Every structure is written in C-alpha cells, then in structure tokens.
Image (tube, rainbow, N blue to C red):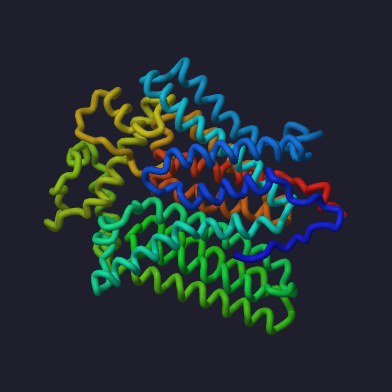
Amino acid sequence: MATAHTSPSPLSKPIGWADYLCVASVIGLLSIWVLPDTIALRHVLIITGFLSACRIIGTSTFFKERRFFELLPLIFLSFLFVWVVVHYFFFSLNPTLEAQEIRSLWLRSFLCAVMAVGLRISIANHPSLQPYFFAALWVVPLINLGAYLALSAEAGRWLSHFEFVVGFVFKKIEAAFFGVLAIAIACANLIDAMSHVHERGLRKKTLWYGIGIGIALLSALVTGTKNGVVAGLGLCVVLAFAYLFHYMRFTQSNIRIRALAFAIIVLLGAGLVWKGLNSYSAATWNHLLEDVRIASQVDTHSVWKKNNPTQFPLAPSGRMVTGNTYERVAWATMGLRLIEHYPYGSGSVNRSFVLMLNHAGVEHQLESQTHSGWIDFGLGFGIPGLAILGLVFLSCMWFAVRQKTLFGLLAIWLTIALVPFGLIAEITYKHNFEILIFFIAFASASAIVWKPSSLKS
C-alpha cells in the first residue's frame, strides 16, 4: 500500500527468480487461503514458496556466523515442531489422528514457516517487493466488503450480518483474522513512518494505510464478527496514543497539530465502528458480566454440552443469557479445567476439545472447538505447547524492541495483535493454523536483527 523507506544500494543485487517466486506464492496464498475448495492450489503455492524460500535462505547471510542466542525466536519456534513429534510418540491420545495431522496440517505449517523466513529475507534484500506483500493482506477484506456491497445491491437494501454470512463463502473468523493481520501491518508501517516525518510521500502513505484500516474494520463489521472488530479497535487505540506520545515531543507546532488531528480521526473512526457494532449487539454488552458468571458454572448448567441448543440458562431476572457468550465462556471454562487435569494435551489441532472431553468421560454432543485459539491449542498440545508459543512471543518482543527498523515493528505489532486475538478467536483451527504459523514465523524472523550486506553502507 506504500513504498518502503529503505532504498536499495547501487551495489545491491538484482531481484532473483527465487525472490519473485516466493513473494508471488505468498501473495497467491493470502488471496485464496480462506476460499473453499482451493486445497490443491494451496499445495502448489506452498511448495513453490517453500522451494524458493530454501533458495533464498541458502544464498543469504541470515543464518551465517550467528550465535545461538541471536536466533532464539526461530529456535523456540522450531521447538514446537520437535514437541509435536515427541508428543506423537509418548503422549498421543489418538495416534492415528495425530499422525494424519502431522502428515497434512503440520507439514504444511512447517513449509509455511520456512516460506515466511524466506519472505522476510527477500523483502529485506529488495524493499521494492514489500508493498506487494503488504497490499496482499487486504485482498480478503476487500473481497468480503465487495461481496457485501454486491449482495446488498442485489437485495435492494443493506443486509444484516446474519443474512450476509449465510449468503457468502467466508466465515466470520476469516474476515476477522485477516482484518486484524492487515491492521497490525498498517500500524507497524505507520509507526515506522514516525521516524521519517520529513520524507516525501509520507502523507500519501498515511492516507493509504488509514483507508486500509477502515476497510479492514468495515469488513469485520458487516460480517458481525465482534472479536475481529474489538481486536481491530484495540489496535487503533494503541496506534492513536503511540502517535500522540511520539509527535507531541516535537517542537514544531505543525507536526504536533497533524499528529493530534490524526489521533482524533483514528479515535473518532474507532468510535463510529464501535457504535455500529453496538447497534446489533447492545444486549451482549449490557449483560456481559452476568452472562459470563452464569456461563462459567459448567457443573450447574449443562446446556454447553449440547450441539446447537435453542434454550440457554436463565438469569435471576428471568432473562435468557446470550447464547454466543454462554457457549464461548462455558467451553473456555471447561477447556481450562481439562488442560489443568491433562497437561500434555490430546495431540490434535482440529479436534482437541472433543478428544479431551471424550478422554475425560464427559458426555456431550459437541463437534466444535472452544473458539479460543490458545485454549484449543493447549487442549491439543498441553502446557508444554503453550509454553513454547509463549517463549516465541516473548523472544519476539525482546529482540524486536532492540532494533529500530520496520521489521522490528512488524514483529511487535503482529505479536500485539495475535496474542490477545488468539484468546477470543479460533485461529488454531484447520487452515487458520497454517496462517497463524506463517505469521508467527514471519514475526520471529523479523524480530531477529539482520541487515543485508547489499544494503550496508
């Protein structure tokens, strides 16, 4: 959506075929990852991205003459794949299912992780490729928003989010996930622009990324995905205060006025989106605490064990609790209890909750996950798996804050986005898990300090 700040040196190497192929594969994946019936094409793009990334990594200095400590984020991430193999041999509750997921989902995720490292190296070597990767993150929000406008025009009225979700191929989580990722990338680029306040094209870049944030939020809003809207608004609030904190230290009044205006625009826009969200979910927020308290009583109420129930527990006032809130909180409560009792997990990514309920002898009719990505992953690979992910995110932040570059900011903002979003969204389910591992690997590689030799002065 905007050009990078770093200009290639006159001595920099020309862009090679592997760089083009890696970036093109990533763009293709970001465009079709969430579309149904694209598994064959996804396999092709993942393989071409992996092979080109291997070429890029093999010919770069990224891993050469490094100390162990300098690569900690990627080393911790590699431990996750090691733990999966160890879990399969010693702790699996369903070895057949776990082996199937290792050969499919985990293998694709590993290839995606390598591709993400290659992408980080490629777009650092060749900054002119960065805008294509960044812009590709808006393909899904644009498709989603465009489809909503087209279906509304066909119906002759604005569709409700219920009607739209039924009438289009995307699920709520997909609009939310890509929206949050796009906003995180936009925030990183906007914060990076702070250190280039006198650069030409800064206003244009700010405008484009501001529009991009608006598109991502609207895409989540028309789908009715509360977790996506809330996460996106949270990132916007952090961005607004970061802008104020940075620019208010300048002595030039015009710069301070522009910063204040930008922050006000971001906060007002966030307020309008929140008002739009509240227009159809006011009941959810008005009784949220009471609903959470009732839903957490999983031994008192057993409605959470049913598949698609139509009746939910009653509050003391006689009001029926909000179904969506009740199910998510009750499943999360039970999921945490199961993790406490079975700390090594079931060994499945896609059926971790159901497998663990069965293992614990809990009678139920469920076929879904808890809808909390980190709880679902903890049910699958236990406290060790969650601890490894925690080390990955902590090392990303530790390394990223020590480098004042765009890549450090990308690692910081992706971490800020993914950690809380994973608490309220099922980002560890099916192809969403591949996307998650790709961006965790990209953040891990971005957090590592490295400057291409071709760009060194």
Q: Is residue 412 left or right of residue 285?
A: right
Q: Nearer the viewer, residue 204 or 84?
A: 204
The total of numbered circles placed on residues is 0
Residue drawn at x 39%, y 60% is 144
- Above or below 319: residue 97: above
Image height check: is 221 above or below 54?
below
Q: Is residue 344 left or right of residue 289?
A: right
**Quadrant containing the N terminus in the rendered view:** bottom right
Q: Is residue 123 found left or right of 364 in the rendered image?
A: right
Which quadrant: the C terminus? bottom right
Residue at 35%, 53% in the rendered image: 170
Front in this rendered view, residue 333 or 218: 218
Question: As displayed, is residue 311 above or below residue 162?
Answer: above
Percent coordinates x, y for residue 14 in the rendering:
78, 51
State the residue at coordinates (65%, 56%). Answer: 130
Residue 407: where, in percent of width, then height?
67, 52
Return the residue found at the far top. 90
Left or right of 222 on screen, residue 59: right
183 lies above or below 115: below
Q: Position of residue 334 (x, y in %)?
A: 30, 36
Q: Quadrant of residue 63?
A: top right
Estimate the x, y position of residue 35 in percent, counting from the top left: 40, 49
The residue lying toward the viewer, choosing from 11 and 359, is 11
Rendered residue at 66%/47% (across/down): 120
